[in-house]
Amino acid sequence: MHLRSPSVAAGVSAFLWSLAFGVCVWLFLLGIHVSQAMAVLLGLLTLCGSFLYIRTSGRQGRLRRKR
């Protein structure tokens, strides 16, 4: 029996990575005592920017192994 990971669409994967990065930036900004409004704004801008970058320049397909 060969177990495979579930298939995830490229857009969903890009969003999840961007969400994780945006949350990390938001927490970092709160940690260095930036105002809440500025931290949320920069976190959301990071999320949107990284989503667009990952989605447009990310790998389009998975590489297949030759048997």
Image (cartoon, grey):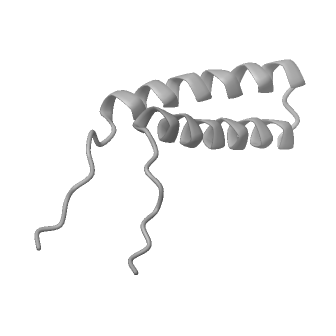
Residue at the farthest front position: 1
Above/below status of 8 relative to 30:
below
Residue 53 image position (x, y, % from top left): 41, 29
Above/below status of 15 relative to 44:
below
Residue at the farthest bottom position: 1
Residue 33 image position (x, y, % from top left): 88, 35
Residue 30 image position (x, y, % from top left): 85, 37
Q: Nearer the viewer, residue 20 or 63?
A: 63
Quadrant of the rendering where the N terminus is positioned: bottom left
The mark tally for this picture is 0
Q: Nearer the viewer, residue 20 or 24?
A: 20
Q: Nearer the viewer, residue 27 or 60?
A: 60
Q: Residue at x 27, y 51 (%)?
A: 62
Q: Residue at x 19, y 60 (%)?
A: 64
Q: Nearer the viewer, residue 26 or 35?
A: 26
Above/below status of 18 relative to 63:
above
Q: Residue at x 68, y 23 (%)?
A: 44
Q: Residue at x 42, y 67 (%)?
A: 4
Left or right, 56 with respect to 66, comes to right
Quadrant of the rendering where the C terminus is positioned: bottom left
Residue at the farthest left position: 66
Residue 19 sits in which quadrant?
Answer: top right
Left or right, 52 with respect to 58, comes to right
Left or right, 53 with respect to 36, comes to left
Left or right, 58 with respect to 41, comes to left
Residue 43 sits in which quadrant?
Answer: top right
